[in-house]
Image (cartoon, rainbow, N blue to C red):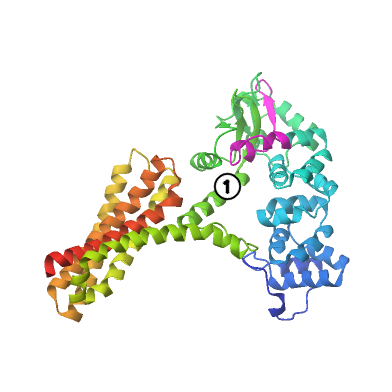
Amino acid sequence: MSRETVDLAQLPDRTPPEAEEDLEDFALGEDYALNPEYTRMVADALERGDTERLRELLGALHPADIADLMGFLSGDDREELLPHIDPEVLAEVLSELDTEIREELLEHVPSATLAKALGEMDSDDAADVVDDLEADKRAQVLAAMPDLERAAIETTLSYGEETAGRLMQREFVAAPQFWTVGQTIDHLQRESDDLPELFFDVYVVDPAYKPVGAAPVSHLLRAHRATPLAQIMEQVNEIPVDMDQEEVAYIFDKYHLISAPVVEPGGRLVGQITVDDIVGVIQEETEEDILALAGVTDAGRDAGVFGIVRSRLPWLLANLVTEAIAVTVISPFQPMIAKIVVLVMLLPIVSSLGGNAGTQALTVAVRAIASRELNAANALRIVARELSVGLLNGAAVGLMLGGGLYIWQHDLKLSLVVFLAVLANLFVAALGGILAPIVLERLGRDPAVSSSVVVTFMTDFFGFLALLGIAALILL
């Protein structure tokens, strides 16, 4: 979420609806975005201290919309609003909040209230919240929780960040492989209070509690009661607890999974991952790659100026160094530039065209690597394709620029210089854009983070060199 806090004073006055069903319609627009006027209504109720009105306004919102509302309010208003949110609703709100806002709010939630809210969450969401707590507050909250829930959270936190162990929920449904459909359904009805809030499969396990298959709930409801689970179960894709979450998301996408069992090193079933968790992972990983391509980090709604500067300045300084190196190639050509002044105007055009072409190839390559579409089996074909695209684009753009220059200067040799320089630089841009991320990925580095600086340096350096070098050969 990147929207800024709403300037409530700039909104027009409107008579708010009173009925709860009207409030629900008024709260969200057709695009499901929170109505800014609704945010003002909440802020006004906070200012008046109108507890009844606040509960009415919050009651008309889904927990995800309350989380969105928090992002539009000031820090003081968020703190005032917290006591008006029921612990059951607070659980869902906390799991939906931006990390920075959640960390801020957790300081103001009483430990007992937070412990109760965590008890309403799935174990994976609860662990995420506990992980954001300061050490002292974490100890207080965990001490206030029942032993079983506390143990589940502590076990989840023992796994590495961004792994399947952190992503999984420890609540799942399992049945022995010798059970029938009828026995399974009877078990689900008897234990309904202890079932996960959301599940899609009943995992069929052997005596060692290793998953041997999964019986989708839809299959259970269609099958006769006497049917053995072994006859309707499907093969499962087991997820090791230490698998990276990006790898997990790839498996879900590739095999169109709704849920998958998570197993520890010995193969024992310890949890499950469901598709709603994967949607969040895909969004998170996509945002990271997009931001990394530009050399920035996420600037949330409450991000400070100096924090943003610290995240962006190093990449600008690195770019400054590479650009300083790139322009040194101009020095040997100064006498020629003095004679042919128009070359000064052409230098930024040629380098800029190469930079854009390089970014295009780079973006395609990073996406292909992230989605496993680019690997050793097809790398040569993809590289050859991008080089062909670079040559064709270079020829087309070079002809247009060279033709325009000829109409202006009536100099065929100068037009030929520009055509060849653009052709060469777009070829190099395609080469750098596709090879830089491949090489960095092979070296174990994140191609999204470092590639853009490399490609920018290559296109600027070679753009200057190509234009001035070809001009020296043809014009002098």
Examine the structure image and report whether residue 174 is included in the region drawn in magenta: yes
Could you tell me if residue 18 is visible in this image?
A: no
The residue that appears at 64% across and 28% down in the rendered structure is: 269
Q: Is residue 415 above or below residue 294?
A: below
**Is residue 421 magenta-colored?**
no
The answer to which image quadrant residue 83 occupies is bottom right
| Nearer to us in this view, 69 or 235 | 69
* Residue 128 position within the rendered picture, expressed as x and y whole percent measured from the top left: 68, 45
- Rendered residue at 30%/48% (across/down): 383
In the picture, measured across the screen, residue 281 lies left or right of residue 416, that is right
Seen in the picture, residue 199 relative to 312 is either above or below; the reply is above
What residue would you read off at disc 1?
281
Query: Can you tell which quarter of the image residue 326 is in?
Result: bottom left
Q: Is residue 41 visible?
A: yes
Residue situated furthest top in the rendering:
207
Residue 399 in the image: state x and y as whole percent. Answer: 21, 69
434 with respect to 407 (left or right): right
Q: Where does residue 361 sit, x and y in percent of width and height? A: 35, 55
Task: Classify mark 1: residues with Cα within 10 Å, few (<14), some (14-19) or many (20+).
Answer: some
Does residue 232 appear left or right of residue 27 in this picture? left
Label 1 sits on what residue type?
A: Val
What is the magenta range? Answer: 153-179
Q: Position of residue 444 (x, y in %)?
A: 43, 40
Horizontally, is 338 left or right of 316 in the view?
left
